[in-house]
Image: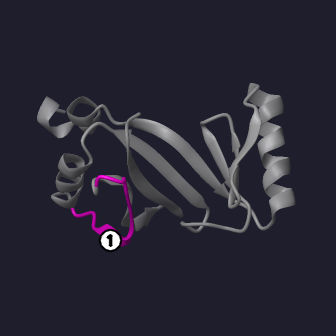
Amino acid sequence: MAQSDDPVELFDLHVAHIGINTDSPEEADAVAAQFETLMGLPARHPAPISTFAGTLVEVMNNGGRGEKGHIGFYVNDIPAAEKWFVARGFEINEDSRALNPDGTTHLVYFKQEIAGFAIHLTEDK
């Protein structure tokens, strides 16, 4: 694969986290606790809709995007990455676009799922 065809090289693309859909806050907490036991990833509650295990696993407590969940990818240039993926046939779900205070995109999902997982891009921290 040529460098211009490799999003890892072009945008420093790397996994931000995986999201797992569950049916209740209790189930989400139990799944996050399993990841804490398995990997030592501390369970935390940064939002009322999910429980995180470290920063790598987000467990949605009443379902979420994607049939099974979602996969988030960090990129260093969201507008350029969007154009790159759109050129490959992936559509942007404009309804999912979350903006920073300055109007730039913080997070955006594709319309297509892959194997039951919604996919989103987010800015690299």
Residue 32 against residue 37 in the figure, above or below: below
Say left or right for 102 vs 117.
Answer: left
Q: How far across and how far down the image is residue 57, in percent?
A: 64, 42
Amino acid type indicated by mark 1: Glu
**Between 87 and 79, which is closer to the camera in this rendering?**
79
In the image, residue 94 sits, relative to residue 35, either above or below, namely below
Give how far across and how far down residue 73 sits, in percent: 42, 44
Pick whichever, 61 or 46, lies toward us.
Answer: 46
Count neighbours of disc 1 (C-alpha within 10 A) and say few if under 14, some if 14 to 19, many if 20 or more.
Answer: few
Quadrant for the C terminus in the image: top left
Magenta range:
89-102
Q: Quadrant of residue 96?
A: bottom left
Query: What residue is rendered at 34% in x and 36% in y?
Result: 13
**Count of marks placed on residues:** 1
Residue with the mark numbered 1:
94
Q: Is residue 74 above or below residue 115?
A: above
Please name whichever residue, 82 or 117, is drawn nearer the observer in this view of the structure: 82
User: From where the camera sits, is residue 54 visible?
Assistant: yes
